[in-house]
Image: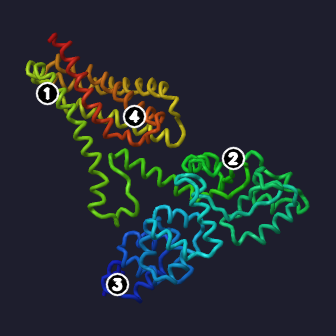
Amino acid sequence: MPPQQARTLRDLLDDDDLRGLQEWLAEHQPYEIADELARADEVEAVLLFRLLDKDRALTVFEELEPTDQHKVLSGLRDTAFRDVVEQMDPDDRARLLGEAPAKFARHVLAGLSPRERALTAALLGYPEYSVGRYMSPETVAVRFHVTAEQALAVVRSRGADAETVYTLPVIDDRRCFLGTVSLRDLVLSPPERPVSEIVDRDRPHVHATDDVEEAARLMQETNVLALPVTDSENRVLGLLTIDDAVEVIEAADTEDIARQSASEPWSGHYMSAGVVELARSRAVWLLLLIVAATLTVNVLQVFEDTLASVTALALFIPLLVGTGGNAGAQAATAAVRALAVGEVRSRDVLRVAWRECRVGLVLGVMLAVVALLIGALVVNVTVAASVAVSLVIVCAWAATIGSTMPLLAKRIGIDPAVISAPLVTTLVDATGLIIYFLVAQLVFGL
């Protein structure tokens, strides 16, 4: 007989096979379990979570996004509820409460111990997208005048309560930031060597009120595992750790991708998002784009006589509109991405415009050669020439507009991703048609 096929988690849930579910949970990694909890509805997610042992449950819970954490917590009894939120890291707890309804947040805070409540409340006091909301306040800092041996003793005595001990802020007697020292350097240094001799004073640090995405990008660029966070008086408050930085960058990229595709970002797992929720996230932009697309209709009405005189021009409207829109979308996407990773700044708008204009010209010439051959074979040389010249101009124009709009948006304080590829495409469609018909009028002498 052939071996029996392994039952999926879906099969086990449908059959209410609790023993099978426990075996499945024991055989899979926490991140795999977290993904399944995010996919499941509230009842199933709570059931799976309650089947986990206490230590494993916390590990799985920390892998979940705040929206999915709220889904699990809302189905737990008060005792289990308090146990989970009490054991969470303060920064993770602050992000959970920052995205939760006020009633839920008050319920969580009321069930915490005084120490954990104070730590969480302090983080919630910072702006929503600031470093202070994401930093870990449970940090081991060492004083600059102690020896390596004494610093290691501090790590041993206080390290169990800290989120990380691999990067240690070095402070003076007033707790002001002086630099960092790595655990590796402390272990490899002679015991009597002062920390002041091995401290790295050039390591970057950020303020608690700084933008968290910029801080995360800084960590990415400088290849550090943790970034010290200070207050306005340069006193150490905590650390922004690499795991939180990765989540910040992932969330920012996800939001940018959603906006570039003309939709609003949604929270939580895609598979658990409702149909209405997904439709709502896309409907607003589609309605706006429909209104913007009326520009194209107006252009066609203005040049109706030109189109009636040379009807063959209509054959190449889809080619011209599609090419211009795609060229603009490519440039807009490249600009938004370059802005996100810090490769360009809003003040570089003229340099970027000139660069992309030349890129568009090169692309336009390449495409014009192909269009000239196709147009000459399908219609005639005169129409083909109109299409070819239009392609060169449209590609240059589209690339210029597509690249500069995100930079200008950044300069006036608008999210560059809002100037999304579909919006650029719609604008280029209308202006591209104007260019096409003006070139045709010149070529045909209309």
Asked if marks 3 and 4 touch (Cβ < 8 Å), the reply is: no
Check residue 204 in the rendering and tell me which mark sits there, or answer none.
Answer: 2
Q: CA distance from mark 3 to mark 2?
A: 58 Å
Q: Secondary structure at mark 4?
A: helix
Q: Which mark is residue 314?
A: 1
Q: Which of the two discs, 2 and 1, labels the residue nearer the N terminus?
A: 2
Q: Position of residue 345 (x, y in %)?
A: 53, 34
Image quadrant in which the N terminus is located: bottom left
Quarter placement of the C terminus? top left
Kindly identify which numbered label has been placed on residue 3: 3
Residue 200, compared with residue 315, is above or below; it is below
For label 2, the crowd category at 10 Å Cα-Cα, with few meaning under 14, some 14 to 19 and many 20 or more, is some
Q: Nearer the viewer, mark 2 or mark 4?
A: 2
Asked whether the beta carbons under mark 3 and mark 1 sit within 8 Å of each other, the answer is no
Q: Amino acid at mark 4?
A: Ala
Q: CA distance from mark 2 to mark 1?
A: 59 Å
Residue 331, numbered circle: 4
Q: CA distance from mark 2 to mark 4?
A: 33 Å
